[in-house]
Every structure is written in C-alpha cells, then in structure tokens.
Image (cartoon, rainbow, N blue to C red):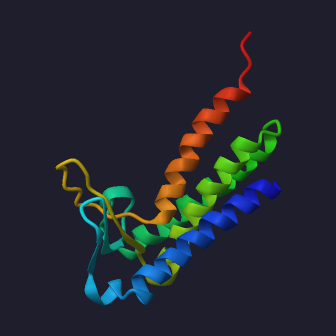
Amino acid sequence: MRLIVAAFALAFGLDQLTKYLVVYRLGLIDRYAIDVWPPILNFRYGENTGINFGLFDGGADTGRWILIGVSLVICAALTIWTTRQPAHRGLRLAAGLVIGGALGNVYDRVLYGYVLDFLNMSCCGINNPFVFNVADVFIFAGAAGLILFEGQLKKPA
C-alpha cells in the first residue's frame, strides 16, 4: 500500500506543481500561448470540462460532478483491486500513478469547474490541436503499466 501512496503523491504533486508554475507563475493564464520548443513542446492554455480530447464537453455543472464521481469510484475500485492482488511492485506503482493523475484532475474540477491543461506537442508535420497536462501523462503511463503488469500475474497452465 505504501508504494501506491508514494506513486499517488508523486503524480498528484507534480501535476499540481506544474500547473501552478506554468499557468500562474509563467503567466499562461494571461498569455494563452508560450512557445517553448516549437513544434515539439508548446504551452497552450486550456480549460477542459470534458474528458480526454474534450469529449463529453457539455459544460453543464451536472457533467462536472458526474465526472468527479466516476473518477472517485474508479480510484477506489483500482485501490481495492490492486491491494487484493499478489504483491507486485510494478502493478502497485502503476495504480498509484493512475490514481494520482486522476485525483489531480478531480482536484481541478472541484476547485475550478474544469481541468487545467497546458501541454501541446506536435511533430513530423502533424499539428496537434489538443492540450493535456501532467496528470494525463501519469494516467496514460499508469494504465499502460496496469496492462503490462496485470498480464504478469496470470500464470500459464
């Protein structure tokens, strides 16, 4: 359980720290765009009331609380499922990353009514119009880890 909590704290803390530094200290909230290393890395201000890539972006307050509730249920279920599995450090680390990222976005939804996004990355002639945040990176990496490490729990017959 300690590894889940440590990974959660890392993901949550880095997500909130980067949002504060980029959005408020660098002034992205006022400038809306900062080119860091174009086109590879740009900061673009975004307020996401939906889920990934703006899906389910209805803007209704009911949707906000539904997304918060669904995220909390998923975090609780993931914690319960992971702690009931045989001790596997990779699985617990991955679960903590997903939970930390998800709760970082939940925190934004509760505080602001939307998720703060600021990362925009493009490459190879493809112009990516979407923005995301560090929590999304941790959710993606953690989900990949859950898939990878869950497969290691199953022993061949």
Percent position of residue 153, x then y: 73, 28
132 lies left or right of 99: left
Residue drawn where x is 72% and y is 52% of the image: 79
Does residue 44 sit above or below 149 in this rendering? below
Does residue 142 sit above or below 87 in this rendering? below
Residue 81 visible in image: no
Residue 54 visible in image: yes
Image quarter hosting the C terminus: top right
The front one of 83 and 72 is 83
Residue drawn where x is 55% and y is 45% of the image: 143
Percent position of residue 132, x then y: 38, 63
Image quarter hosting the N terminus: bottom right
Does residue 117 sit above or below 90 in this rendering? below
Residue drawn where x is 72% and y is 13% of the image: 156
Count of labels in the image: 0
15 lies left or right of 38: right
The front one of 104 and 114 is 104
Does residue 75 sit above or below 116 in this rendering? above
Percent position of residue 131, x then y: 32, 64
Q: Residue 84 appears in which quarter of the rendering? A: top right
Looking at this view, name the residue that lies furthest to the front.
Answer: 37
Residue drawn where x is 51% and y is 63% of the image: 135
Percent position of residue 94, x then y: 64, 48
